[in-house]
Image (spheres, rainbow, N blue to C red):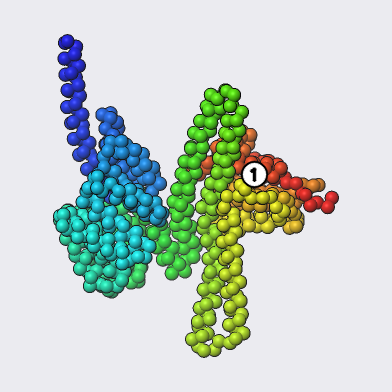
Amino acid sequence: MKQEINRLTDNSHQEKQNKKTIKQLGHLINEAYKLMNSDPELCIEKSREILLLAKEIKSLRYEGLALMHIGLGYFHKGEHSVALENYFKAEPLLIKDKSGAALRGLYNNIGVVYREMENYDKVMKYYKKNLSLETEYPNIQTTTTMLSNLGLICERLNDNETAMEYYLESLNLAIKNNFPYGESFAAINIALLFRKKRDFDNAHKYFKITFKANKECNDKIGLATSYQSYAYLLCDEQKFEEAFRFLDFAYNLARETDAKSVIVSILITMASINLSIGNIEKQMGKLKLAYEIAKQENFRNHLVHIYKQYFEHYEIENDYKEAFYYYRKMQKIKDDLFNEQKVRTIAEINSKLLVQKKKHEAEVYRLKTVELSKRVDEEIKKREKQQQIIIQKSKLESLGQLAAGIAHEINQPLGLINIAIQNLFRKFNKKNITDKYLKEKSEFIDENIKRISQIIEHIRLFSRDQQDSESQRFSIADTINDALSMIQAQCKSHNINIVKEFDSTNLETIGNKYRLEQVILNLLSNSKDALSEKFDEFDDAKQIVIRLKTIADKIIIEVEDNGIGFDAKSLKHAFEPFYTTKDETKGTGLGLSICYGIINEMEGEISINSKKGFFTIVTIELQNYFSTI
């Protein structure tokens, strides 16, 4: 009996301790929330402490909220994929705990991230998930925010009329329920939409509502960003002195709250306006301050804008060496941000495939029955389907990484068409256009439109699932050239020289030409990465040589680079799935294994010769079915 009393006493003490911890967690969550703009790194650090504390007392709600605030910190750092990763970890915890209000906030946050990534299908999916909880978990704050966010999506899709309806509904709901934060959010969106329409009187009216609401809820950071937006409106009206006055207000508020990201953003705005009015000295001074903070805090999105202004400044000054230097730095960050999301997507697929593989092996081991043979056949078919999925995902990943090069291929003829049309208008306006000139320009425009159509058609055919495509006779030289067309712009931007050594351009084989193109693309991409590891970005010694020749009844394709190379140990495992020598954020270990599988399907052979620190040569041997030997 005494032991039972002691146990009950212990439980009572534990409950009191848990209540005390819950109260502490609530206070810490509020602190983390206030830091997400001013100091995202500290917001993440505090939220991780909250996560550990929540796990100790097994509070699903605060575990979910901690993960959600870790995501908020990463979002305000501009690391969207990491933000999503934490949001998705929070979702099942909040669902299990039935924390409806928190779950609505989470779905809103996920939608905001996808909005920044311009994935509007996913945005609508999570906004609809939020609204589906409105009846069960009514919340004025969340509903007003959702209405404003829906307005932002409509505005992004150029439906300004519907956007204005959502903003006004959100504003009226916020005013009616005395929710100044929602009022400021809706009002500034209305003000910015009126500014876009060049209705400056109404824009001023709603900016004033925004300022008043910001002050009511003591939102200094919100007020700072509102002043920053207002400065752009004043610039539209050529009121530059007043614009700088409001930017000074914004800057002081941001410094008062130590909101480093907002400080950098305001400095960039100051620099931009100084550039537009020709005050280069002040522009460069503000940019220098912005750069020092952005570099120290690793604000990569801000660095893109800073490097862009440096590039534009030095281009105006005709200092093309410096201009090119900052253009390359800007482009590198853009490429890194774009590729990080793609790499994470592939890593997720790899992880799922590994899990499926383990389940498959366990199932085969368990099923030692009369039906074993039948089940194994079914599993083999599934495995083959998974391999096709991996190949298709790899292909789409390649297209994602080569998007810039493809855009360049399309932009070139588009630029020519634009120039031709401008020339036609000029001639037309001067009334000296001749039938011959009109015919020549029309044919020229038609040729470039056909070129764009061919590029798009090629990408469409390359990107579709080829697993059911029949084998056909095709030119290997054409296939190599098609692969080069998608990567050569990217290689050029990395200062890589590509050399073609074709003994013949008439070599043909039988198979799926898009699969072979995928192999060539993978090998060229590997070579590019190997060169980047060995040389700095401005070194002009980087070279890829691609050869096409015949030996007896074999067609030989070689891809050689003078990059970092493989060591003897790595060379033995090169074609194994998921084996990679690259950094974990840059390689999945699937590229060469996919190449091996595709060449094997074509009844060919693929091999690697390499020396660490010097070179790599990948050799493909295919059957020359049309040899005259």
Q: Position of residue 193 (x, y in %)?
A: 29, 66
Tag 1: amino acid = Ile
Q: Position of residue 124 (x, y in %)?
A: 36, 53
> Can you see residue 610?
yes
Total numbered badges shown on the rendered structure: 1
User: In the image shown, does 345 or 334 lie closer to the viewer?
Assistant: 345
Mark 1 residue element: helix
Residue at the (38%, 45%) spot, across then down: 84
Question: In which quarter of the view is residue 232 placed?
Answer: bottom left
Q: Residue furthest top?
A: 1
Q: Position of residue 104 (x, y in %)?
A: 28, 46
Q: Is residue 543 above or below residue 315?
A: above
Q: Is residue 10 above or below residue 75?
A: above
Q: Position of residue 116 (x, y in %)?
A: 37, 54
Residue at the (50%, 88%) spot, across then down: 430
Residue at the (19%, 56%) spot, across then down: 174
The quadrant the N terminus occupies is: top left
The residue wearing badge 1 is: 598
